[in-house]
Image: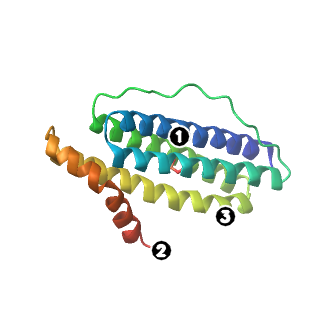
Amino acid sequence: MKKEIEKLLNDQVRYEANASMHYLAMASWADVHGFNGVSDFFYANSEEERVHMIKLVKFINERGGKAIVPALEAPKANFETLNELFEEFLSSEIYVTEKINEIIFECLSHKDYNTHNFMQWYVAEQLEEEAQARTMLDKLNIIGNDKTGHYMFDRDIMSFKATSEAQTPE
Ligand code: OFO
């Protein structure tokens, strides 16, 4: 594996690890504020990001590179509103998508078609996650400051997730 690609993949390990910790902090905030559905949603997302990170670590090592387990900064722990939480979720996903696109670009310019192929899974995953974050933020924007609306959003969030997954084209 080319050193440039190995470096980008190791950077990606850090972004996935950061997303995992970021979502863990969001889950914990929701947990202590009584939003149990939102908290379950972010605990599950934190776990998913950890899986994405491990997949990259294994790939780098299998291809003769050396995966680096990164040191991380503490994630933001306090949020004012559910909207703020989901705005951060969407911007985190948009950021990760940009980073994945950079890897795809470099894979093509270095003719690394194996890594390009491997990264297609991440491209599809980002499409789904960004769409999901947008749907949830749209719902919260409709709800505004209505407490009953927040209660119902929290109750229904896992079914939104299931629905958006079912709607994702193969
Ligand atoms: Fe790793 O899937 Fe989004 O960030």
Dot 2: few (<14), some (14–19), or many (≥20) neighbours within 10 Å? few
Task: State the CA–CA distance, disc 2 to disc 3.
Answer: 17 Å
Rendered residue at 40%/42% (across/down): 89
Query: Given contact means CB atoms under 8 Å apart, are the residues at marks 2 and 1 in contact?
Result: no
Rendered residue at 73%/53% (across/down): 110
Q: Which residue is mark 3?
A: 117
Report the mark closest to the observer, 1 or 3.
Answer: 1
Q: Amino acid at mark 2?
A: Glu
Residue 71 point in image, percent of width and height: 67, 28
Residue 134 point in image, percent of width and height: 32, 51
| Vertical relation: 65 (above or below) 29 | below
**Mark positioned earlier in the residue sequence (2 or 3):** 3
- Relative placement, left or right, of 115 versus 162 is right
- Relative placement, left or right, of 61 versus 160 is right
Q: Secondary structure at mark 3?
A: helix
Residue 86 point in image, percent of width and height: 34, 41
**Mark positioned earlier in the residue sequence (2 or 1):** 1
| Vertical relation: 116 (above or below) 21 | below
Query: Given contact means CB atoms under 8 Å apart, are the residues at marks 1 and 3 in contact?
Result: no
| Vertical relation: 90 (above or below) 112 | above
Rendered residue at 71%/58% (across/down): 115
- Relative placement, left or right, of 13 versus 84 is right
Q: Is mark 1 within 8 Å of ligand 1?
A: yes
Q: Amino acid at mark 1?
A: Ala
Report the mark closest to the observer, 2 or 3.
Answer: 2
Q: Secondary structure at mark 1?
A: helix
Q: Residue 19: which disc? A: 1
Q: Which residue is mark 2?
A: 170
Q: Amino acid at mark 3?
A: Asn
Q: Looking at the rendering, which quadrant does residue 127 occupy?
A: bottom left
Task: State the CA–CA distance, disc 1 to disc 3.
Answer: 23 Å
In front here: 141 or 46?
46
